[in-house]
Amino acid sequence: MRALCWEGADELAVRQVPDPELRNAQDMIVRVRQSVTCGADLPLLAGRSPYLVAGDVLGHEFLGEVVEVGPEVRRHRVADRVVVCAAVSCGACWYCRQGLFACCDNGTAGGPEAESAWGQPVGGCYGHPARTGGFAGSHAEYVRVPYADVGAFTVPEAVSDDRAVFASDAAPTGWLGAELGEVGPGDVVAVWGAGAVGQLTAGAALARGADRVVVIDDHDDRLRMVERHVGAEPLNYRYVDVAAELRERSGGRGPDVCVEAVGMAAGPPGLLGRLGGGAERPLALREAVHACRKGGTVVVLGTWTGSVDAFPLGAVMNKGLTVRSARQHGQRWIPTLLDRMARDELRTEHLATHRLPLERAADGYALFRDRTDGCVRAVFTP
Ligand SMILES: NC(=O)c1ccc[n+]([C@@H]2O[C@H](COP(=O)([O-])OP(=O)(O)OC[C@H]3O[C@@H](n4cnc5c(N)ncnc54)[C@H](O)[C@@H]3O)[C@@H](O)[C@H]2O)c1
Ligand SMILES: [Zn+2]
Ligand SMILES: [Zn+2]
């Protein structure tokens, strides 16, 4: 089959790779209909993961059609239209039973590296290096879906492919952000980053009843989307003092909940970053900690792999902040999100600004990486 392979820093190529096969009784094979770029791919693309190997297939947010099921798959049949959670989780281990699917003990194949970097291995993810599972990515014609009954969800007829594909990762991540922040009526929420994740976090905060939601970025095209499609307030950090402006919009206190949805993609590539343990510059996170009201919550949704430089721990301690973070536990929220999509309460299709055939995926990544031509997410169709 054809698939988008990482060949080296900023080098991508569509190549012929072996077709995936059923390996376990709970596996199924999905023919990909849509597969989307994500901010989490950018550090990988830049060669900042020491574990990515030339030839690895990228991509983890996807939707497709079931073409083959293993003997223990109960919830899916050939020809079903499914969206697949980006996280690979077994559904049966202690962590999965707590609903902490992204912490799964069995969905990972990258034990030793993750253990040395983070103390414990974590759950797997498609299209990521061995450290977080080593599962082949979705920018391909076919994908093997392990633990199919746990990770794949039938898409309701009323929901289009263009909308449902975002239920794979970006939408559950946004939902996670609002949930970790325990956002509720009366809250003022600030979100750093107006990418798909930031926009869907803002939408989730409004859905949970937040009074005001402000999204911070320097890309006016993305900020216009925030206003038009999400109904949140845009704030361009190039033109204003962000902390002062946020205080102004929150009764002089600062936001109750501050969400960082930027991640290390904004940091400098370099040797330290490549070694995974290097110090990244968490500019947005620092600003979030400073801006947050005393006793408020800071949520880290952005992807980080190693250490960060100059984290303002003093502000966390003295202001009594709660800092929470996670990779999305999509298996918990995808059914609800699909229902919301079917009721037209959650719209995501505006995020797919660019649609390209898989053969042109390298061009799609260039647009997405450079945020040119108004690109928010590029969708590939094999
Ligand atoms: N926690 C999870 O499970 C999970 C899941 C998916 C994605 N992510 C992470 O979420 C982050 C966002 O993903 P995305 O796809 O929206 O990425 P993206 O690259 O499209 O968006 C990031 C946005 O942040 C903006 N930005 C950069 N520096 C900023 C700053 N200092 N202040 C404010 N905004 C700034 C950029 O202009 C961009 O619009 C990434 O780090 C991604 O890896 C996490
Ligand atoms: Zn993603
Ligand atoms: Zn598990």
Image: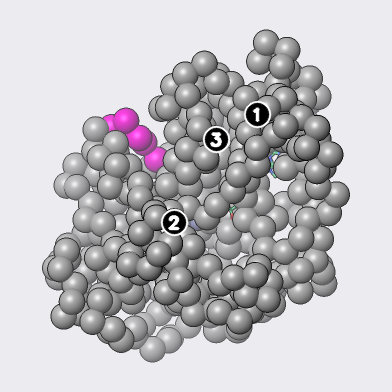
Residue found farthest to the top: 251
Instruction: Kindly tell me whether residue 168 is visible in this rendering.
Output: no
Note whether 315 is above or below 108 in the view shown: above
Q: Quadrant of the N terminus?
A: bottom left
- The answer for how far apart the CA atoms under marks 1 and 2 are is 24 Å
The residue that label 1 is drawn on is 296
The answer to which quarter of the image holds residue 323 is top right
**Mark 3 or 2 closer to N-term?**
2
Taking depth in this image into account, of 249 and 381 the one nearest to the observer is 249
Mark 1 CB in 8 Å range of ligand 1? no
- The answer for how far apart the CA atoms under marks 3 and 2 are is 16 Å
Left/right of residue 155 with respect to residue 131 in the rendered view:
left
**Mark 1 or 2 closer to N-term?**
2
Instruction: Kindly tell me whether residue 103 is visible in this rendering.
Output: yes
Q: Quadrant of the C terminus?
A: bottom left
**Mark 3 or 1 closer to N-term?**
3
The answer to which quarter of the image holds residue 146 is bottom left
The residue that label 2 is drawn on is 100
Of the residues shown, which amino acid type is indicated by label 3?
Answer: Gly
Q: Which residues are magenta?
A: 344-348
Q: Which mark is residue 181?
A: 3
Q: Position of residue 170 (x, y in %)?
A: 46, 49
Residue at (24, 33) in percent of width and height: 343
Q: Position of residue 96 (x, y in %)?
A: 38, 61
Of the residues shown, which amino acid type is indicated by label 2?
Answer: Leu
Is residue 346 within the magenta segment?
yes
Is residue 13 within the magenta segment?
no
